[in-house]
Amino acid sequence: MPKFAGDLHTHSLASGHAYSTISEMAGAAAKKGLAYLGLTEHGPNLPSAPHIYYFGNLKVIPPQIQGVNILKGVEANIISPAGELDLPNSLLENLDWVLVGYHPDAGFGGGSVETNTQAMIKAVTNPYVDALVHPGNPIFPVDYEAVVKACAEHGKAIEINNASLTVVRTGSRPNCTRIATLAARYKVKVILSSDAHYADDVGKLDAAYELATSCGIADEQIVNLTVRGIEEFLVSRGKKPRVDSTTPAV
Ligand SMILES: [Zn+2]
Ligand SMILES: [Zn+2]
């Protein structure tokens, strides 16, 4: 597996069912040579997730910790068939990085494939959303081709989640294989993420990379493989890149 430049989907203690501090997560990222770490606590509708105030006060976290650029973000929940999210746009617009996805117990348990697909596409079209996470979760079946095409059309990234292939969301692999194959066909941008809930898991992307390459996804499609890939994607999303991993925290 090549050396990756970032892991853009991780959780700290603040998510309530994760087990490392932000300092420990950043330290693990530094140790693994990552230039970017996405801190993406669960949106407030998930039981145990931080209160909405948490996301409004992320300014107290420095932009770099131990030399690692911190993308202060969220993993927001899709909470209705209309694709509404559990953070208002007024907060999302101030975050560095916005992931969105389905989770059980977050207010919307899912419906028919058609309903799930429509809600997911609506969420993808939210202008503040950057990437769609673990769309292969079998609990929320969707029309994968329609979802991948929507990500391509709106310049959003789609995730291959390493944890979905190893420790959680049992039954995801065939769906992830289908999504990765479609992502290769439609040349959509892809993020490979650990979804770490413990510091040792930061940067664990081997299963996701193996699946991505076996499905024909080119290295150039993988946003978080290189610093340039991450920064070009941030710019494409109208966000400020950090220039490079040696930018001093001021
Ligand atoms: Zn998740
Ligand atoms: Zn997550």
Image: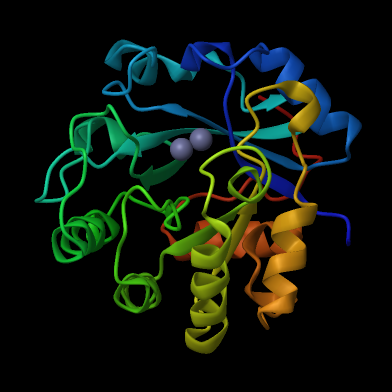
**What residue is rendered at 33% in x and 18% in y?**
56
**What residue is rendered at 75% in x and 55% in y?**
207
Looking at this view, name the residue that lies furthest to the left.
Answer: 82
Looking at this view, name the residue that lies furthest to the bottom.
Answer: 185
Residue 66 visible in the shown view: no
**What residue is rendered at 48% in x and 11% in y?**
16
Residue 88's image quarter?
top left
Task: Tell me where residue 145 appears, x and y as whole percent.
Answer: 36, 79
Say which of 237 and 123 sits in front. 123
The image shows residue 116, relative to residue 91, as above or below, that is below
Say which of 205 and 58 sits in front. 205
Q: Quadrant of the N terminus?
A: bottom right
**Colour scheme employed for the rendering of this structure:** rainbow
Task: Tell me where residue 35 appears, x and y as whole percent.
Answer: 77, 43
Give the left or right position of residue 171, taking residue 108 as reference: right
Residue 49's image quarter?
top left
Q: Quadrant of the C terminus?
A: top right
The image shows residue 184, relative to residue 88, as above or below, that is below
The image shows residue 127, relative to residue 77, as above or below, that is below
Task: Tell me where residue 183 appears, x and y as whole percent.
Answer: 52, 77
